[in-house]
Structure formats: structure tokens, C-alpha cells
Image: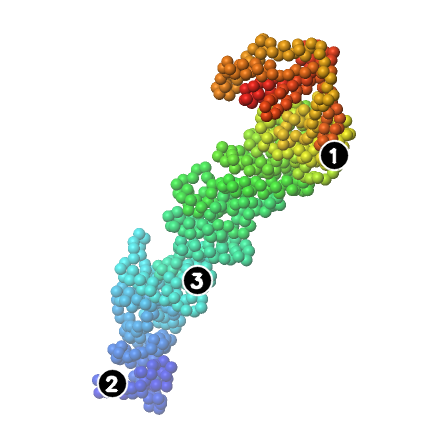
């Protein structure tokens, strides 16, 4: 017997899918027809009501669906519709189970092929598989690719749930623990025990994850995990732009480990370091902002902390990129001279902060926090390799040190000249200069010639007077008690610089005063005042320097003579109170000559030293002649030629002239002269080149004998300057040499007057000696070495 069951279509219009409502379903026992009207529905109290599917009879729907469960498997039912049916059953579960066999009906619900997995499959739950019930929002975050295969192989069902289905699944006996999407992965999909590795099934799932575009970007597009960088890496978080990180929920910390498995970039690679360094360099084009500071510090800290950075090949690539914050010189140092780099610097050719005092104006200074090798006294092999790849110097090249020293010393010299060095900074400057001196001293053996280039740089700091002077203006100690400093041209180096005296000597410091120091004082003063008239203070300096110069000329050492030869000019004071090159001046040593010559001399006169309050014993001109010729002034008396007028000579014959001639031609005298000459030759370098034989002895004797002696009453010489007679000079001895093509005549004029021959010889020793010397020279035709 067939029983007709009416189905109330209108009552289930919102629940049942159209695919079910489109036709009649027949079985051997039951015919089900769809009826939109309710007129044929029996009274609900009628026993037939139990068999009619209607909104008020959800149990009939369950029985109907269970009856046709196999047919449902073959139907294409949307997941949305399947969930709708199950939600209807869940909402009416109490009514369905009322006065019925609860276990039987719950089993029928499980057997319905309407339960939806997160991958969209419709399954029944009458299985031994493990069932996980996931909230609907969680199932949206799960990557479904590969899960069907995983579920099949692991015997796990991941059910998609809704708020209305929770109570149903609880009654069905399944857990409803609250799982986040990440919990599903780590507690179930990718679960491993400590010390174990992923299984083949899990690795297959991981391989699928890596190739699946499931991670959403900030623009809404989906990409593979490998497209992104980890927002949980501090370096990446700071260096990368927001679009390089995944959007929520994958930006939450709980996804960190999962995204690593899915191949997100979570480690900073060498290539990233190069890119980050260039990023910082580019950002700094507009100045060092707080962002630039943070990025630079973070990147540097990361680089220095990398375990195998020396073998990654990245150090050389970043060594020339300017992404490092520079060492900042102190304000008082920058007031002296601005440091070389106030913008970002690179590693290559930089020097450590510990040597900034000898390089901050000429080198890039690496701040301590960016220095990979802080203890340079104990570098290991790895540190040396890192330093080499980055191109960091242990200390600045000597050329850069020289540049730096010149920079700050020239600047401080100018500040001192303008009285801009503050008292509070004197100690700082002195400590800094001592460090510089110590460094330079350590380079004396290796770079002595290079260091000499600092001889014209004012490197010596005199703290008491806040002055900077060149070493050639300094002296270790004064030669006598009456010598004093001539500031700023001659200064005594403070005793506290004792350990640097050798350095200062190399650069020109004198151990004690000499004529050279005072020549230099006058030279320095002239370089400042030029040809201008000197003021009272400058005249005082000239007086002090000139007085000490003349004093030291009394005894000039060979070393001083050699030093003077290397100097250029001596400047002396003119009567117009200007300093001029001594070679262009005339020193008047004869008032009579000066009165007669006057301005015809054509050169300015040297100021009389007596007018400067300088008085010395002896001849000033003779002392000045101890200077190299290029430094000597023109001595007025030396510009005058002496001419003998033979017409005014009155010959005298009293026997003294003949006596002198007999003495010169005597055997004893000539033998003595020859012996002296031979001995002279043996004591000089030319001794081996001169062989005195008997013939030469005869030549020497004949030379003496040929010297004519002419005795006269008096010898009056005419003094001539440029053809003009400017005076006369009476002499007691005068040697004159007459030369022509056929004969050389040497004449010695003698005016004995009341003197004896012996006394006359003593008084005219020099003139007589010169006459004999010339006679011997002509005799041998070989100039004698004086």
C-alpha cells in the first residue's frame, strides 16, 4: 500500500534547495508530492499529520531527507543551501526529538550527506574519521588547497560551521572547542612532536602552501607567502614599506611561525642588506631625519650581529654606500674647524673614533657603535677580515693627518690672532695638541720627511699666551740670562712639552738661541709689515733682534753657518724705519766717506745701531761679514777703490829699504819660506798633487827675489767712488802689481818714517804677507789655497 505524503513547499521555500522542489520523489512504499497549498493537509492531530512534511513537522523533513540520502549525494547542492537545511534542523532539534527515539534520529542527521567541509565538500558523518568543527570566520582563513587530499589520507573532516549549527554538533557528540585558523594548522594539520620532522603528508601540504597565493596584500590582492617580508623581523619592519607585509589576519603575531613554513621572507639576506643600505643613503639626500637615524642604527646593529657576515660577501658591497651616522665632533672642536662629514658616511676609508683627534677634519670618523673592531689591540682573524672587507683603517693615513693638523693649527692661529680662544677652552686645546704631538712623534722614524712639511705650520701651542707658533720660532732654552722671548717671533717651548722636543726639533725648533734665530725674527717681522714704517712696538722687536744678532755673530759655529746658507735674506732697519733686504742696503762705516758720497751711493743706508741703543766692542761691519755674502749689507768703505798716485811719491834712501830687500833675499828667509810652503802642501788635500823638486825651489826663491822694494817718504792713496775722488788715505805699506805681455812686476812701497824695520814689519804683517803670497803664486803658476 502506498501512502501519499504531502510536502508543504511554501513552508520550506527558504530552506529547501530548488533542486529538491523541482520534482516528485517516488519509492516502493511512498509517493511524495509537492503541494503549494495547505488545503489537503490533514489536521495536525490526525495520525496522518505525522507523515506530512510541513514547517510544523520538521521530523518528517528529516525522515524524508534521510530516506533520499543516497539520491542527495548525486545532486549538486550549494553549500549555502546545505547549511540552510542543517540550520533548520538545528533550530527545530528539540521538536524533532520530542517523543521519539533520540539516538535513531541523531544517527539519521549524521548520515545526511549535507554536512559541509571547509573545502566545500558535502559529507555524511557516519564515519570513524576525526571531525573538527570550525567557526565560519575561521574557515575563511584556512587555505583549502591540498586539504581534501590531506583529509582523505589522515582521516580528518574539517567541518564548516555557523552560529546556528554549534548546538546541533554538540548534540551529535562532536567537540566545539574554539579553534583559530592557526590552531588548526599547528594542532592538527602540521602537528609534530618535539625533535621530530614533518611527515611526507605534511611536507606535501607545505609544498602546496608555498605555491598557493593565499596571503592577502594591503591592496586586496592575493600572493604567495614568499612575496612578503615578515612584519615580525625588527629590521624588515623598520626598513620595508607597508605594502611589503601581508594584510590581516596574517599580520598578527600568531601567524608568524606558519608564514615561515609557507616561505615568507623572515630572515634578512645579504641582498636585502645592500638594498636597505641604499635605501638609507637615498633617504638621507634630504638630510638626516629621525627616520634616517633609526634606520641607520638598526641596519648597522643587524650587520654587526650577523654570525657569518665575513663569509657572506656582503661587506665589500656595502663598504662604499653612505648609510652610517658619522661621529659627531664636540661643539668646541667644530668651532675650530668643521668636521669633514656631517652627513652619512660609508665604511671604506673611515677611521675609528679613537683617533678622531688626528683626523676629524680630513677623514670620515666611524662612531664607536658602528665599529666592528673596537679593541684594535687584540683583533682576531675574523675581525681583521671584516675590517679588511669594509676598508676601515686602524688609523688615518699620514697625509690625512698632515691635512688635519694644518687645518686646525691654521684655524687656531687665526683665532689666537683675533683673541677668540676662550680661557675655558685652553685646557681642552692643550690636551688635544698633546695627543697630536704624541701621534706625530710615533711617526718620526717612518715619515720624518713627510712631517717636515709641518715646519711652516703653527703647531706649537703656548697656553700661557694662548698663541700658536711655528717650530722655527721656538727654542728649548735661551743661550744667556739677558735673552728674553720676542713674542710672537721667538718663544720658549714650555717644559711640559719635554717629551716632544725631538719632534719640535725635526720641525725647526732650536735647542738654544743662535744668530739664525734672530735672522728669522727679522724675516718674520718683515713678512708681516712689508715695506711699511714700523711702529714703536715693532721697532722694539728690531732692536732686541739686532742686538742679539750682533752678539751671536761674535762666535758663529759651523752648524750655524750651514743653516745660514740655507736661509734667504737678512732684513735690517733703514734710516726711514722700514725693514729691507740687507743686500740692498749700505752700512756706513766712515762718516767722511758718507758726507762726500751722500745719496750718490744709490742705496738706502742701514740705521745706525747706536740710534737703536746698541753698542758693541769692535767693528760691526766685520761681524756682519761673517754672514753668507747674500746676507751681507754693502759696507761703504768696501765700495771705495784705492788708487796710488806715483807722481806724489818721494823716494827715500836711508838703508831700511835695502835692509828689507836683503832680509827677503837672505838664504835663511827663503829657506824658511820654502820649508813652510812644503809643510803647507803636506797638510792639505792637494799635497799628493804637488811635488816640490829642486827646480821649483829655485822658482820660489826667484819669485821672492823679484819682489821690488821701494822706500818712499809717505804713501797717500786716493779714494775713488764711481770715478769721483771722495777722500785720501795715508798708508805705511802698499803692494802694487803691474802686469803686461812681457813682464810681471810686483812692487812693495814702504814708508818707514820714524819706525824701525822690525816695528814696521810687525805693523804691516798682513800687507807684507799678501805681497809674498802673490810673488810665490806667480813663481809656481799655481794658485795657492787659502
Q: If the image is split into quadrants, where does the N terminus sit?
A: bottom left
In the picture, residue 506 is in which quadrant?
A: top right
**In this rendering, is residue 740 above or below 699?**
below
Residue displayed at 63% across by 36% down: 469
**In this rendering, is residue 282 above or below 763?**
below
Residue 578 appears at what percent x and percent y? 72, 36
- Disc 1 on helix, strand or loop? helix
Q: CA distance from mark 3 to mark 1?
A: 95 Å
Residue 71 appears at what percent x and percent y? 26, 79
Residue count near mark 2 (Cα–Cα under 10 Å), binned few <14, some 14–19, many ≥20: few
Q: CA distance from mark 2 to mark 3?
A: 60 Å
Residue displayed at 34% across by 81% down: 16
Going from N to C along the chain, the mark reached first, 2 or 3, is 2
Q: Read off the residue under disc 2.
A: 26
Q: Read off the residue under disc 3.
A: 244
Q: Residue lying at the far front in this picture: please name it.
A: 742
Side of 445 where 268 appears, left or right? left
Going from N to C along the chain, the mark reached first, 3 or 1, is 3
Residue count near mark 3 (Cα–Cα under 10 Å), binned few <14, some 14–19, many ≥20: some
Residue 186 appears at what percent x and percent y? 35, 60
In the picture, residue 638 is in which quadrant?
A: top right
Which numbered marker is on residue 600?
1
Please identify, in this view, whether the residue under mark 2 or under mark 3 is nearer the observer: 3
Residue 47 visible here: no
Residue count near mark 1 (Cα–Cα under 10 Å), binned few <14, some 14–19, many ≥20: few
Residue 278 visible here: yes
Amino acid at each position: 500500500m502506498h501512502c501519499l505524503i504531502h510536502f508543504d513547499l511554501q513552508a520550506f521555500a527558504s530552506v529547501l534547495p530548488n533542486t529538491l522542489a523541482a520534482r516528485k520523489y517516488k519509492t516502493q512504499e511512498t509517493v511524495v508530492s509537492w503541494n503549494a497549498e495547505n488545503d489537503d493537509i490533514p489536521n495536525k492531530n490526525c495520525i496522518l499529520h505525522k507523515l506530512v512534511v510541513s514547517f510544523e513537522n520538521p521530523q518528517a523533513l528529516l525522515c524524508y531527507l534521510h530516506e533520499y540520502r543516497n539520491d542527495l549525494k548525486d545532486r549538486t547542492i550549494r553549500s549555502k543551501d546545505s547549511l540552510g537545511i542543517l540550520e533548520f534542523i538545528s533550530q527545530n532539534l528539540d521538536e524533532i526529538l520530542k517523543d521519539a527515539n533520540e539516538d535513531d534520529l541523531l544517527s539519521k542527521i549524521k548520515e545526511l550527506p549535507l554536512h559541509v567541509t571547509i573545502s566545500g565538500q558535502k559529507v555524511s558523518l557516519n564515519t570513524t574519521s576525526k571531525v573538527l568543527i570550525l567557526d565560519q570566520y575561521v574557515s575563511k582563513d584556512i587555505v583549502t588547497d591540498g586539504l581534501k587530499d590531506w583529509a582523505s589520507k589522515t582521516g580528518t573532516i574539517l567541518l564548516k560551521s555557523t552560529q546556528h549549527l554549534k548546538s546541533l554538533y554538540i548534540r551529535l557528540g562532536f567537540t566545539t572547542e574554539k579553534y583559530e585558523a592557526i590552531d588548526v594548522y599547528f594542532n592538527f594539520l602540521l602537528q609534530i612532536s618535539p625533535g621530530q620532522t614533518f611527515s611526507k603528508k605534511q611536507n606535501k601540504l607545505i609544498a602546496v602552501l608555498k605555491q598557493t597565493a593565499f596571503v592577502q596584500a594591503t591592496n586586496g590582492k592575493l600572493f604567495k607567502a614568499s612575496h612578503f617580508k615578515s612584519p615580525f623581523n625588527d629590521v624588515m619592519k623598520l626598513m620595508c614599506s607597508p605594502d611589503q607585509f601581508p594584510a590581516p589576519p596574517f599580520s598578527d603575531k600568531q601567524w608568524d611561525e606558519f608564514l615561515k613554513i609557507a616561505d615568507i621572507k623572515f630572515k634578512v639576506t645579504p641582498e636585502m642588506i645592500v638594498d636597505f643600505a641604499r635605501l638609507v643613503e637615498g633617504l638621507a639626500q634630504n638630510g638626516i631625519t629621525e627616520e634616517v637615524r633609526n634606520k641607520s642604527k638598526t641596519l648597522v646593529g643587524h650587520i654587526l650581529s650577523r654570525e657569518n657576515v665575513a663569509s657572506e660577501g656582503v661587506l665589500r658591497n656595502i663598504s662604499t654606500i653612505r648609510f652610517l651616522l658619522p661621529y659627531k665632533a664636540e661643539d668646541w672642536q667644530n668651532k675650530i674647524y668643521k668636521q669633514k662629514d656631517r652627513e652619512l658616511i660609508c665604511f671604506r676609508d673611515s677611521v675609528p673614533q679613537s683617533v678622531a683627534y688626528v683626523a676629524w677634519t680630513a677623514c670620515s670618523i666611524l662612531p664607536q657603535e658602528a665599529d666592528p673592531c673596537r679593541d684594535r689591540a687584540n683583533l682576531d682573524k675574523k675581525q681583521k677580515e671584516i675590517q679588511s672587507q669594509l676598508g676601515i683603517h686602524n688609523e688615518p693615513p699620514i697625509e690625512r693627518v698632515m691635512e688635519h693638523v694644518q687645518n686646525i693649527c691654521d684655524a687656531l692661529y687665526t683665532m689666537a690672532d683675533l683673541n677668540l680662544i676662550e680661557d675655558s677652552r685652553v685646557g681642552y686645546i692643550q690636551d688635544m695638541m698633546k695627543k697630536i704631538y704624541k701621534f706625530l712623534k710615533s711617526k718620526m722614524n717612518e715619515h720624518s720627511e713627510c712631517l717636515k712639511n709641518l715646519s711652516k705650520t703653527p703647531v706649537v701651542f703656548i697656553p700661557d699666551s694662548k698663541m700658536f707658533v711655528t717650530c722655527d720660532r721656538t727654542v728649548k732654552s735661551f743661550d744667556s740670562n739677558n735673552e728674553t722671548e720676542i713674542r710672537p717671533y721667538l718663544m720658549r717651548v714650555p717644559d711640559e712639552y719635554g717629551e716632544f722636543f725631538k719632534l719640535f726639533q725635526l720641525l725647526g725648533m732650536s735647542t738654544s738661541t743662535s744668530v739664525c734665530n734672530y735672522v728669522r725674527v727679522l724675516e718674520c717681522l718683515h713678512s708681516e709689515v712689508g715695506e711699511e714704517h714700523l711702529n714703536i712696538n715693532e721697532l722694539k722687536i728690531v732692536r732686541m733682534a739686532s742686538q742679539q744678532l750682533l752678539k751671536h755673530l761674535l762666535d758663529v759655529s759651523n752648524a750655524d753657518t750651514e743653516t745660514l746658507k740655507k736661509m734667504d735674506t737678512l732684513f735690517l732697519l733703514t734710516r726711514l724705519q722700514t725693514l729691507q733686504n740687507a743686500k740692498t742696503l749700505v752700512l756706513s762705516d766712515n762718516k767722511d766717506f758718507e758726507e762726500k758720497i751722500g745719496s750718490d751711493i744709490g742705496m738706502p743706508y742701514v740705521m745706525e745701531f747706536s740710534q737703536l741703543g746698541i753698542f758693541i766692542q769692535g767693528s760691526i761691519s766685520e761681524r756682519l761679514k761673517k754672514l753668507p755674502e747674500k746676507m751681507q749689507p754693502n759696507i761703504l768703505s768696501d765700495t771705495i777703490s784705492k788708487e796710488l798716485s806715483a807722481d806724489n811719491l818721494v823716494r827715500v834712501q836711508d838703508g831700511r829699504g835695502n835692509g828689507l830687500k836683503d832680509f827677503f833675499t837672505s838664504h835663511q828667509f827663503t829657506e824658511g819660506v820654502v820649508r813652510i810652503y812644503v809643510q803647507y802642501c803636506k797638510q792639505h788635500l792637494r799635497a799628493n798633487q804637488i811635488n816640490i823638486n829642486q827646480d821649483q825651489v829655485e822658482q820660489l826663491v826667484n819669485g821672492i827675489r823679484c819682489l821690488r822694494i821701494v822706500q818712499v817718504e809717505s804713501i797717500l792713496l786716493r779714494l775713488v767712488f764711481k770715478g769721483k775722488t771722495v777722500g785720501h788715505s795715508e798708508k805705511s805699506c802698499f803692494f802694487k802689481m803691474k802686469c803686461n805681455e812681457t813682464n810681471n812686476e810686483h812692487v812693495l812701497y814702504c814708508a818707514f818714517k820714524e819706525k824701525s824695520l822690525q816695528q814696521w814689519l810687525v805693523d804691516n804683517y798682513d800687507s807684507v804677507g799678501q805681497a809674498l803670497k802673490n810673488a810665490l803664486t806667480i813663481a809656481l803658476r799655481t794658485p795657492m789655497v787659502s
